[in-house]
Image (spheres, rainbow, N blue to C red):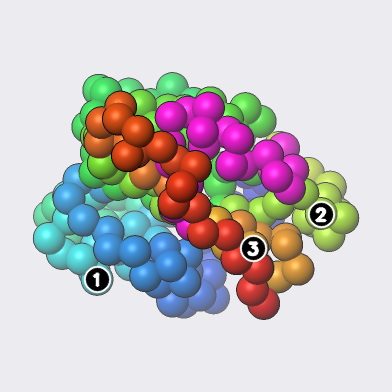
Amino acid sequence: MSSVEASFCRSAPWGVVARRMVPWATQGFPVTGDVLEIGGGNGVMAEAIAGAHPQVRLITTDADPVMVQAAQQRLARYPRAQARPADATRLPFEDGAFDTVVSFLMLHHVIEWERAVAEAARVLRPGGVLVGYDLLASRMASWVHWADRSPHRLIAPGAFEPALRQAGLAPISLRYSLGDRVLRFIARKPSTATAEDDPGDDITSRRSR
């Protein structure tokens, strides 16, 4: 994340927007149980989840220690939420530790974002879900990231679903918005290895404004 993006993520306007974005980003999917957020920045989205779902046990992570410290301060009043440093491609958690993994607009900042998807799948329990949204490759997104000089590898259209399947996740909902520039996703880790859990039968793909 560039210094420009880091400053924006700590700003009051982003805090207001981010809190309102959680229902849109999760497509109304219920966030329950043990929840992990990868690349959570300063914890704005984590705070929104903790406030709306006080029953969940939430860990938000980020590779930037400055962001982790900011998230720790933000989440201090939520006893079931915490912030920890972690690389999304090498998560320091055991297999099957979480019911839900959320990722909000961060995978494109991970050069090997497929590894982050695979790690999310690894730490999910059988039946658990990966939920979130991210940028797809577009001329506009490329210009923005060229201007702010942040490390990134934008997700090519059509590349995300195969990455989910390669990680062993069953796509449930893939929604394309803003002229196919943004992808919202929900994918489940099959509860068994039976044919009923074949990810090819349950995907819903939509394009919306």
Q: Quadrant of residue 5?
A: bottom right
State which mark lies toward you, 3 or 1. Answer: 3
Residue 137 % position (x, y): 77, 49
Q: Which residues are magenta?
A: 152-173
Q: Pick the residue in front: 12 or 113.
A: 113
| Residue sitting at x 28%, y 43% | 128
Given this view, does label 1 or label 2 mark the residue nearer the observer? Answer: 2
SS state under label 1: helix
Q: Label 1, on which residue?
A: 52
**Residue 88 at least partly seen:** no
- Which residue is the extreme one toward the front? 195
* Mark number displayed over residue 176: 3
Mark 3 and mark 1: Cα distance apart in space: 25 Å
* First in residue order: circle 3 vs circle 2: 2
Query: Could you tell me if residue 183 is visible in this image?
Result: yes
Q: Quadrant of residue 195?
A: top left
Disc marking residue 138: 2
Q: Residue at x 73, y 48 (%)?
A: 157
* Picture quarter with the N terminus: top right
Residue plotted at (20% across, 66% down): 53
